[in-house]
Image (cartoon, rainbow, N blue to C red):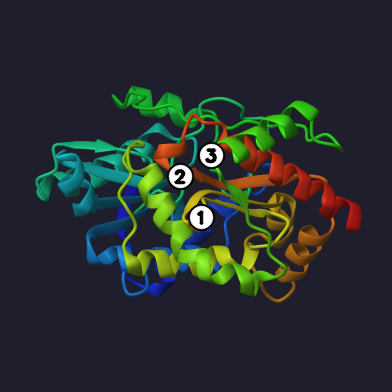
Amino acid sequence: MINIIEVSTKKQLRAFVKFPERLYKDNPYYVPRLTIDELSTLNPQKNPASEHCESKLWLAVKNGDVVGRIAAIVNYRYIQKWGLKNGRFGYLDFIEDFNVAKALLESAQNWLKSLGMERIHGPLGFCDLDPEGMLIDGFNIPATFTTTYNYKYYPSFMERLGYKKDADWYEYEITIPSTPPPILNKISTRVLKSHNLQILDFKNKRDLMPYVPKVFQLINSSYSDLYAVTELTEKQIDYYAKQYIIFFSKDFVKLVIDKNDNLVAFGLALPSLAKAMQKCRGHLFPFGFLHLLIALRQNDRAELLLIAVDKKYQKTGVNAVILNSIAIGWGSWRGRV
C-alpha cells in the first residue's frame, strides 16, 4: 500500500531533501545538490518566494520506506504575468513503480485544482534559478552541479499519466582549446569596438560587489520572455546572490559594459563541482567543503552557470565576447594551477 504524507515537520522535510541520495546511491551520473540550500529553499520561512507562492510537499511511503516525493507550487506572479492558471509540480522523484508516480502527481493535481488552477506543468521550482526540467535523453552522461538528473523510466511514466512535452531545454559540452580560436578573438574585438563596449577587469571579489544587483537586474530583463520565467523580487535577488557570490572569481565572472557604465552582458562559470558534490553527497560538513575547495583549485572541466545579454544587444555577437573572455580566463586559471 502506498501512503502519501504531507510534509509538516523538520524530520519529514529532511527526508524529502535526502530521498534522492538513496534513490541514486549507486548511480554514477547523478549529482546531489547542497543539502543546506535545499532545506532553505523548501522552507517558507526562509525562501522569499513564499511572499508570492503557495506550496505543499508530499512523501510517498511504502512498507515504511520513503519511495517518492513531489512539490506542488502556485506562483501568483507567474499567473499575473502570463495570464495562465498553471500550477507547478517540482522536486519529483520516485522509485521504478508507476503507482507511486501516479499517487504523487494526483496529490499535486488535486491540491492545485482546489486553488483554482486549470493546468499543471513542470518540473519547475519557485523561480528560474531553482531545479527544473526532466531529462529525456543522455542518461549515461554525468549531470552538472546545476542541472537535474533522473532515471530513464521517469519520462515514460509521465507520458502514461497523460503528460506531454511543453518545452525543450538543451545542454551542450564544448572542448575548450588551450588558446581560443583566432576567429573568436577577432569577432570579440570587432563587437566591442563597433558597439563601444568594454570588458570589466576585476582584481578581486570586492571590486565586483557593486555590480551584483545589476547582474540580477540584467537576468530579470534578458530572461523575461523565456518559458515560465517570473522576474526575481529584490528579496529573491538578495537570497540567490548569497548562494552564487561564493563562487564568483575574477577568472570566471565576465561583465561587459557600455560607455555609460551600463551592464549589457554577464557570464558566470566555475570549475566543475560535480565530482566534488558526489564525494560529499551534498554535505558541507564535516569534510565536504574540502572536496569543493579542491575542485575549485584543481580541475579539468568548467561549467557555465549563467549568461545574460541585454535584449538590445542580443544577436550582435556580445555572447561571443563573454564566451571568449571566459575561455581566456579558464586558460589563465589552468596555467596558474
Say if 115 sits above or below 119 in the image: below
Residue 46 at x, y percent in the picture: 37, 73
Q: Are the residues at dot 3 and dot 1 in contact (C-beta closer than 8 Å)?
A: no
Residue at label 2? 93
Horizontal arrangement in the rendering, residue 303 relative to residue 91 (left or right): right
Horizontal arrangement in the rendering, residue 248 relative to residue 215 (left or right): right
Q: Are the residues at dot 2 and dot 1 in contact (C-beta closer than 8 Å)?
A: yes
Residue 215 at x, y percent in the picture: 48, 57
Instruction: Report whether residue 108 is seen.
Output: yes
Q: CA distance from mark 3 to mark 1?
A: 50 Å
Residue at label 3? 195
Residue type, mark 3 in image: His
At 46% from the left and 32% from the top, the residue drawn is 154
Instruction: Report whether residue 14 is seen.
Output: no
Say if 118 sits above or below 59 in the image: above
Horizontal arrangement in the rendering, residue 180 relative to residue 20 (left or right): right
Q: Quadrant of the C terminus?
A: bottom right
Q: CA distance from mark 2 to mark 3?
A: 47 Å
Say if 60 sits above or below 213 in the image: above
Nearest to N terminus: mark 2 or mark 1: 1
Nearest to N terminus: mark 2 or mark 3: 2
Disc sitting over residue 19 in the figure: 1
